[in-house]
Image (cartoon, rainbow, N blue to C red):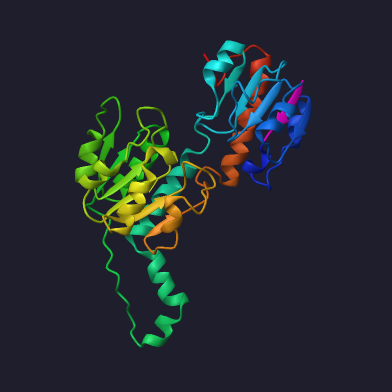
């Protein structure tokens, strides 16, 4: 069996991939262009990728390919219908980063509501040492207890965030397909109108693309805190950036982007240095603990596939 890692650097340079050699011959590439994908998959049985697009074009030479393993939960970079037509199995990994993403989400919200970035800057700049005032209380910040926290997408991550939000004393409103008894379930527009905090955890599909757009932002409370740890294209990024600059959105944190990494022409480049903005380079899934679990699951997916077991298959 020949296994090819196409973009191993996306998993971090500190992760050990050597134990995959127990399964067969392994080739590891830090990253791959579309042309390199064609070359590197020509004689492999298993492809492992995190972010690269695998479709009819990039897999044109992969005549022996039997299995695609996505080192993630989302798989919008894989042409599933093409894989099915070719009889290629596709596996993802679910649940490995639930606690990790929930931790980052809650951390973002607390940093934004506490205005931590601005207060820390008042000390690091030397202003606090020089001002002669014991307590600097500008900008104003609020208690989180009693605020309304809207959660868009209520899978494993959304549920985990919901438990923490409730523990912090928030009233939790949930947008999901099927109502549940533990939380108040409402439509997306109700969340936009009523919530002080909105966090996004929904997968990207044609129904969620551009879900948070200019119209919905206009319905939000002035000064709303918005956090996106779902997919970049779930929001209209230009509309979000404009709303941050106009102070309609009072605090914004994001870990995902429609183009990764985003360039200098991206709307968020204009707001990246603002005190009420936190932008991170798609790290919310990636603690060392989560990545070790992830790769252990990928290895099990490969072993299961070749033993005839159906495990984490998204092509079925």
Q: Residue furthest front?
A: 265
Vertical relation: 131 (above or below) 107: below
Q: Residue at x 36, y 52 (%)?
A: 241
Report whether residue 48 is seen: yes
Vertical relation: 106 (above or below) 159: below
The residue range painted magenta reads: 1-6
Q: Position of residue 183 (x, y in %)?
A: 25, 35
In this rendered view, identify the residue nearer to me: 250 or 105: 250
Q: Position of residue 57 (x, y in %)?
A: 62, 23
Residue 240 shown left or right of residue 73 in the figure? left
Residue 95 shown left or right of residue 132 in the figure? right
Residue 215 shown left or right of residue 207 in the figure? left
**299 within the magenta span:** no
In this rendered view, identify the residue nearer to me: 86 or 309: 86
Q: Main secondary structure of the magenta part?
A: strand
Q: Residue at x 58, y 17 (%)?
A: 83
Vertical relation: 162 (above or below) 1: below
Query: Residue 152 appears in which quarter of the rendering?
Result: top left
In the rendered image, which quarter contains the N terminus?
top right
Q: Position of residue 102 (x, y in %)?
A: 43, 44
């Amino acid at each position: 069996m020949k296994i090819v890692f196409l973009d191993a650097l996306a998993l971090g340079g500190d992760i050990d991939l050597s134990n995959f050699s127990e399964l067969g011959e392994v080739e590891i590439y830090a990253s791959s262009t579309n042309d390199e994908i064609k070359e590197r998959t020509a004689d492999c049985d298993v492809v492992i990728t995190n972010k690269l697009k695998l479709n009819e074009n990039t897999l044109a030479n992969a005549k022996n390919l039997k299995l695609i393993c996505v080192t993630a939960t989302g798989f919008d970079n894989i042409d599933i219908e093409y894989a099915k037509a070719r009889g290629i199995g596709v596996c993802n990994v679910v649940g490995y980063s639930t606690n990790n993403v929930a931790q980052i989400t809650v951390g973002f919200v607390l940093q934004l509501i506490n205005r931590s970035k601005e207060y820390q800057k008042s000390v690091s700049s030397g202003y606090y040492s020089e001002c002669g005032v014991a307590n600097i209380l500008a900008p104003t910040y609020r208690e989180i207890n009693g605020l309304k926290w809207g959660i868009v997408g209520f899978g494993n991550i959304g549920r985990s965030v919901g438990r923490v939000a409730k523990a912090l004393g928030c009233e939790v409103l949930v947008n999901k397909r099927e109502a549940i008894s533990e939380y108040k379930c409402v439509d997306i527009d109700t969340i936009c109108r009523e919530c002080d905090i909105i966090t996004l955890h929904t997968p990207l599909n044609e129904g969620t693309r551009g879900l948070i757009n200019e119209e919905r932002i206009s319905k939000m409370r002035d000064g709303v805190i918005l956090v996106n740890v779902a997919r970049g294209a779930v929001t209209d990024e230009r509309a979000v950036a404009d709303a941050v600059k106009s102070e309609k959105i009072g605090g914004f944190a994001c870990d995902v982007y429609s183009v990764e990494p985003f360039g200098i022409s991206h709307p968020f480049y204009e707001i990246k240095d603002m005190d009420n903005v936190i932008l991170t380079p798609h790290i919310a899934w990636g603690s060392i603990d989560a990545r070790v679990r992830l790769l252990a699951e990928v290895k099990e997916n490969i072993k299961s596939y070749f033993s005839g077991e159906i495990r984490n298959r998204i092509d079925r």
